Image: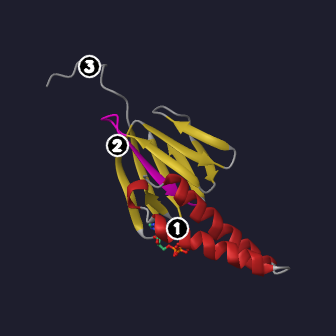
Amino acid sequence: MSTAIGTERKRLGVRLLTPEGAVFDDLAYMVIAPSVRGEVGILPRHTPFIAFLRVGETRLKLLDDTEIVFATSEGYVSVEEDRVLVLVEQAERADQIDAARARTALERAEALLAEAGDDDVARVAAESARRRAENRLNVVDR
Ligand code: ATP
């Protein structure tokens, strides 16, 4: 049980929050998040930073070398003093995604898109629903 000073792995305190509450609140050693400018990898001692997130895959590498993968919606990530905050509208763990539901949502979104015509509001909403559903299908554990 001895841990030599200096060999302990550096860590991040990570909170992944949605309006419904904390989806993850624990230590990790790396966060990989889909920023609008491309994927960002955050390790301890990262400089203070903020970025907007697109719909995509957020991965947390834990201290035991396992990885948790989430389908995440738009939001943002901030980093300060080894604390990472990921704030998104929706987040689902890969192993908790209901693939059948996502496929139904994708079909519904495509039908709504086909019907949207010149209705920009309907088109944007359907495109957004399609992006969320496609993302869940990309991320879900198979
Ligand atoms: P849907 O059209 O299937 O409802 P959506 O993107 O519109 O998809 P919401 O209804 O806004 O989703 O989501 C309500 C809650 O259900 C959120 O907490 C979201 O994370 C979760 N959720 C949505 N789709 C899935 C899914 N396929 N598997 C697991 N959780 C989901």
Amino acid at pointer 3: Ile
- Is residue 81 something one can see in this rendering? no
Q: Nearer the viewer, residue 9 or 128?
A: 128
Q: Does the magenta portion include 63? A: yes
Q: Which residue is mark 3?
A: 5
* Residue 27 image label: 2
Report if the CB atoms under discs 2 and 1 are less than 8 Å apart: no
- Is residue 88 something one can see in this rendering? yes
Amino acid at pointer 1: Ala
> Which element carries disc 2, helix, strand or loop?
strand
Lateral position of residue 119 relative to residue 86, left or right:
right
Tell me the colour scheme of the image.
secondary structure
Q: Would you place residue 45 above or below residue 87 in this image?
A: above
Q: Which residues are magenta?
A: 62-73
Q: Nearer the viewer, residue 131 or 106?
A: 106
Residues packed near mark 3 inside 10 Å, few (<14), some (14 to 19) or many (20 plus): few
* CA–CA distance in space, label 1 to label 3: 48 Å
Residues packed near mark 1 inside 10 Å, few (<14), some (14 to 19) or many (20 plus): many
Report if the CB atoms under discs 3 and 2 are less than 8 Å apart: no
> Which element carries disc 1, helix, strand or loop?
helix
Going 44% across and 49% down the picture, which residue do you hit? 69
- Mark 1 or mark 3: name the one nearer the start of the chain: 3
Lateral position of residue 1 relative to residue 41, left or right:
left
The N terminus: image quadrant: top left
Of circles 1 and 3, the one toward us is 1
> x%, y% of residue 16?
44, 55
Q: Is mark 1 within 8 Å of ligand 1?
A: yes
* CA–CA distance in space, label 3 to label 2: 19 Å
Q: Which residue is mark 1?
A: 102
Report if the CB atoms under discs 1 and 3 are less than 8 Å apart: no
> x%, y% of residue 49?
59, 42
Going 56% across and 35% down the picture, which residue do you hit? 47
